Image (cartoon, coloured by chain):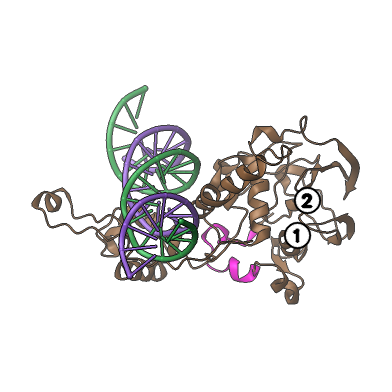
Chain colours: A brown, B purple, C green
Amino acid sequence: MGRTIRTKTSTMRKPETFTKKTDIIKKKLRKGLWSPEEDEKLMNYMVRNNGQGCWSDVARNAGLERCGKSCRLRWINYLRPDLKRGAFSNQEEELIIHLHSLLGNRWSQIAARLPGRTDNEIKNFWNSTIKKRLKSMSSTTTTTSTSPNASDESSSPEPNKEINILGFSGQYHQHANFNHYTMNVPIFASSSPSRNTIFNTANIDTLPMLQHSGYLNTAFTLPCFSQSHQVDIKDCYFENGGVHGNVCKSENVSIDYAFDDMNNILSNCNIIDSNNDNKSGVVENLFQEQLNFGEWDFEELMKDVSSFTSFDYSF
DNA sequence: AAGGGTTACAACCGCAACGAT
DNA sequence: AATCGTTGCGGTTGTAACCCT
C-alpha cells in the first residue's frame, strides 16, 4: 500500500507579493507558500534561539514578513527537524484507522501517537486517502465502523478472552481489522495537565504511545496488526498520580498478541525504575539493533523533539 | 500532445482555551 | 470581571502534480 510520494516544490502556490499601497499600509505580511529563503530564515532562527519566544517575536526577529501563526504552522508542519517525511507505512495507516475509530477527528491526539507525523499530515492523509478507501470498503462490507462512538464496546465484538498483565486484568477483543486489549488500570496524568483529556480516568483505553512522563502505558492497550509473536514487557512503572508509587518490576510478562511497529518500539523501551539513586526516569532503548525493524528510529525521533524536550523526569 | 478531472498536501481561517494584565 | 495576546486545533481552500481519455 502507501502513497505515491509527490515532490512538491515551494512554488506550488506563489508567495504573495505586496505591491499595492494598501497592502503596505496594512502591514507587510506575506501569505501563501513559503519561499526557500523564508524557510531558511525561520529554520536558522529556530536553531539559533532554541525556539524560544512567542511566535510573533519569532516572526519579527527572524526578519520574516509573516504573522506568528504562519511561522508556527510552517515550523510545526514542515520545518521541524524531527518530522518524518514520505509515505505512511501500512502500520501507520492501520494505527491511524484504529486511533480514529477511538478518537474521531482529534488529529492532534492521533498525531501525538505517531512520532514524526503532524496532525495536518494525518488529517490530509485521512481525508484524501483513508476516508475514500474505507468508504469503498464499506460499500462491499458492513463490518467496519469508523465513527468515534461507533466503536463503543457494546457494539464491538464479544470479548473473547480475559487477560492478565502485570497483575491487572483486562479483556481481549477481536475487531474486524485488529485485535484490541483493554486493561482496567488506573491511569496517570500526563506531564501536560491541560492536554489530559483522555488519560485521566480509570478503565479507559490507553492508546498506543510512549508517554512523556516516563512510564510505559502502552503496555495495556495492544492493537494487533499482524501475526502473533511474543512480547516482553519489562520494568513497567506507574506514576504517582495513577497507581501511587506502585512499581511493577521486571516481571517479564509475556503475552500472546501482536502488533508490530509500535510494539517493536515499545518493547524496546525500558523505563528505569524510580528506585534508582538518581531518581530520574530515563527512556532507554534496550535493543538498538532492532530499531530498524520498525519504522521509527526512536533515538532519532527523540532528538530535538519539542514535545519530548524534558527527559529528566522527576518521580 | 492536450486538456479536463482528480489527488495530495501546504497553508489559511475561524474559533476556543488559556494566561497575563 | 474584562480585555488582550498567544497558542493550538479542526475545517476548509487553493493549486501543483499527476492521471486519464
Magenta stretch: includes residue A2: no
Q: Which residues are magenta?
A: A297-313
Q: Secondary structure at mark 1?
A: helix
Dot 2 or dot 1, earlier in sequence:
2
Relative placement, left or right, of A103 versus A225 is: left
Contact, mark 2 vs mark 1 (Cβ under 8 Å):
yes
Q: Quadrant of the N terminus of chain A?
A: bottom right
The residue sitting at 76% across, 31% down in the picture is A155
Which residue is more in the foreground, A272 or A87? A87
Chain to which mark 1 belongs: A
**Seen from this angle, which residue lies furthest bottom?**
A289
Could you tell me which secondary element the residue under label 2 belongs to?
A: loop
Residue at x 75% of width, y 64% of height: A264
Query: Label 2 vs label 1: CA separation?
Result: 8 Å
Residue plotted at (68% across, 38% down): A145
Where residue A137 appears, as percent x and y from the top left, is 66, 45
Where's residue A131, x and y in %?
Answer: 57, 45
Residue A107: x %, y % from top left: 54, 46
Which residue type carries mark 1? Asn
Answer few, some or many: residues within 10 Å of disc 2's Cα (few below 14, many 20 plus, some between 14 and 19). Answer: many
Residue A199 visible from this viewpoint: no
Quadrant in the picture for residue A89: bottom right
The chain under label 2 reads A
The C terminus of chain A lies in which quarter of the figure? bottom right
User: Which amino acid, by three-letter code, is at mark 2?
Assistant: Leu
Query: Where is A188 relative to A111, above or below?
Result: above
Q: Which residue is mark 1?
A: A263
Q: Nearer the viewer, residue C4 or A128?
A: A128
Respond whether the residues carrying marks 2 and 1 are from the same subunit. Answer: yes
The residue indicated by pointer 2 is A222
